[in-house]
Amino acid sequence: MIIQVEDLVVVLKEQEILHRVNLNVPQGKTIVILGQSGSGKTVLLKTILGLIRPQQGKLMIFGQDMFRIEDEHLFNIRKKTGMVFQSSALFDSMSVWENVGFSLLEHSGLSEKEVRKQAEDTLAAVGLDDAADKMPEELSGGMKKRVGIARALIGRPQLLLYDEPTAGLDVIISASIIKLMEKIHAEFSTTELIVTHDLAIARNLADHIAVLHEGKILAAGDWEQLKNSENEFVRYFLNIGEPYEKENA
Ligand SMILES: Nc1ncnc2c1ncn2[C@@H]1O[C@H](COP(=O)(O)OP(=O)(O)O)[C@@H](O)[C@H]1O
Ligand SMILES: [Mg+2]
């Protein structure tokens, strides 16, 4: 198991945000947490990254217990993990390749020339062959997202965490990002944890889906299982866009 979450409780400012969350992310699988805005998706990702301290429960990542982890191990986990932020979070004053190579420029001791080469290779892998010298302001939303993905990918992580990878993108661009995520999974044999409200991601990429609502996992399974879930909210959420009250027609 790459990530193991058991009865995880997260409290922020005296408010319980995650209520006994359970989740397993097996190696090589794509797990999708589906939830509306405010359901606790980003808090869960931040907790997994070690940016928020959980209150109670169990949280193991790459076999390390996050409740008692030392900095040196946290560093190793982060090296094996790539995070794609919702906002892409690019530095406006840096070129595309400098954004992608940022962590290597800072920490790896590699020459600028070598980092640039790795950045260009990674940009090619996300479909941006000629963007290295562009500035972020010259890019469309979909291209910025690709740069954010390249930045997560440059260290060749085993685990990729995506926070709302298609939020704010139109349907066509979203579909191209979903295709790219699928390609990366196949090409780099990564394990993914994706948090999103986008049903298309759950339908197209997930080996396993968990529905998060108000900090609780309401149901988990594959797409077909969840569409027929016993939970009314889960059924409603997954069937949005389908004929309603079909049986009365
Ligand atoms: N640093 C924080 N302090 C207090 N409450 C927070 C903090 N971050 C998020 N929350 C609350 O936690 C809940 C879940 O937020 P979040 O994980 O960002 O939702 P999502 O990513 O699913 O839209 C929200 O009610 C939000 O207001
Ligand atoms: Mg969020």
Image (cartoon, rainbow, N blue to C red):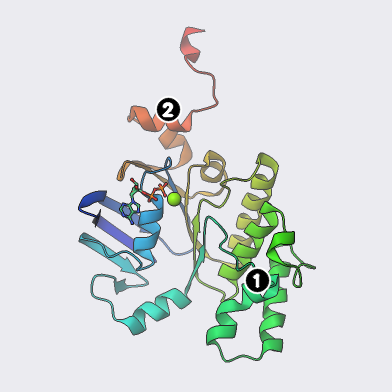
- Picture quadrant of residue 151: bottom right
- Mark 1 and mark 2 residues within 8 Å of each other at the beta carbon: no
Q: In the rendering, which numbered label is found on residue 18?
A: none
Is label 1 or label 2 in front? Answer: 1
Going 65% across and 71% down the picture, which residue do you hit? 93
Vertical relation: 45 (above or below) 176: below
Q: Is mark 1 within 8 Å of ligand 2?
A: no
- Picture quadrant of residue 76: bottom left
Q: Which residue is mark 2?
A: 236
Q: Secondary structure at mark 1?
A: loop
Q: Which residue is mark 1?
A: 93
Going 57% across and 45% down the picture, which residue do you hit? 204
Residue 228: tell me if it is visible. Answer: no
- Which comes sooner in the sequence, label 1 or label 2? 1
Going 74% across and 64% down the picture, which residue do you hit? 128
- Picture quadrant of residue 54: bottom left
Where residue 189 sits: x, y (%)?
A: 56, 66
Where residue 114 sits: x, y (%)?
A: 69, 87
